[in-house]
Amino acid sequence: MKKIAFVIPWYSEKIPGGAEMELRGLTTHLHESGLRLEILTTCVKEFASDWNVNYFKAGTETIHGFTVRRFPVRKRDVAAFDSVNYKLMNGMRVTAEEEEIYVRESVNSPALCEYIDQNKDDYALFVFIPYMFGTTYHGMQVCPEKSVLIPCFHDEPYIYMKVYKKAFEKAAGIIYHCKPEYELANRIFDLENVRQEIPGEGVYTDLVSDAADFRKKFGIDSPFVLYAGRKDEGKRVHVLVNYFAEYLKRRKVNLKLVLIGGGKMEFPSDLVRNKSIIDLGFVDVQDKYNAQAAATLLCQPSQFESFSLVIMESWLCGRPVLVNGDCAVTRHFVSDSNGGLYYKDYFEFEGCLDYILSHPHVADIMGENGKNYVKTRFSWPVIVDKYTKIFRSLAGETSSGKE
């Protein structure tokens, strides 16, 4: 099979974002398995940087043994983009003209698209990730017959823009992380002629965790609920904090909420003062695993997830999870694995906590169920095998059925 090009707006070894981390893991393991591949990306540093700035030098470099090709970006009208993006972020209707502005003034590289057009015969497939950026939208239309999308779809305003139809509905294939993402896509787009697969996402399953080490290092002896991730309203961490504060008022139990990860937010001063809420900020990876093993449970309150690595890590560390019932993806994982519970309002949250705290043996079983679920479905050997079969099939070498 000819080499495969993975196309992403920005790429380096240090970018912490979900799609970026996923692609690093996927390409590294596929390369180690013998698959020939390259990365096509822009010279922009990362999502949080200025998309008009070519931070990296254009050209090629070798990372993890394979070629990364960087292309300069075109200058964009930031004000025009921000005006449309503001409407989308706040659930306001946008016109067809505004949709065109959004994709035109996103991060774009005509040089990257030109390279795809001039060199498409040298590649078996062009795999684009994630869905909402200009590199994906414009790049997929250069060579749709060889274009594959790993969208990372969420149920959010962006996905409903009609402008995406002309790119996604002509793709050779779309690869999803889970069944709810597939179902969401097929409610919005006409994908009858698009090959669709649901292999999942790769996870490192050989984690080592030490609950006792975490408790000793951070001086936390009480049972605790863990939140791991960015602290902002988009992740609904404020709702978790409010629910937890209400739970302590109603139950008077010795229970703490421990948060790890970046971002800042205000917490009830009395709960901080008596150490019922403890924000540890960034911790190293081993401390994160140790925290997950020490926790009574992990709570993932986010409503918009296309996977959720922290859930998988919590299960690998043997602990159950509690998730937002309005997130179809995390609810699916919990139900499919029998590895936790989900809630849709405060009283369901209260009932779930009551149950897990009063049934520690069942909580342990949930954690073990989750661990087995991750290892049998999302370990890297399993994912590499699935992706290799999918890519060979899309390139016309073999057949593959939906998982």
Image: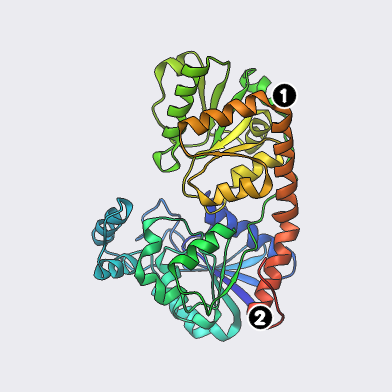
Query: Can you identify the residue that label 2 sits on?
Result: 2
Q: Residue at x 56, y 47 (%)?
A: 331
Query: Can you identify the residue that label 1 sits on?
Result: 212
Question: Dot 2: few (<14), some (14–19), or many (≥20) neighbours within 10 Å?
Answer: some
Q: Residue at x 36, y 55 (%)?
A: 50
Q: Is residue 262 visible?
A: yes
Q: Is residue 36 visible?
A: no
Does residue 75 lie above or below 315 as drawn?
below
Question: Dot 1: few (<14), some (14–19), or many (≥20) neighbours within 10 Å?
Answer: some
Which is nearer the eye, 54 or 370?
370
Image spot of residue 101 (x, y percent): 28, 67
Instruction: Give the amino acid at mark 2.
Output: Lys
Q: Say whether disc 2 or disc 1 marks the residue closer to the N-terminus.
A: 2
Q: Residue at x 42, y 38 (%)?
A: 232
Q: Secondary structure at mark 2?
A: loop
Image spot of residue 263 (x, y percent): 44, 36
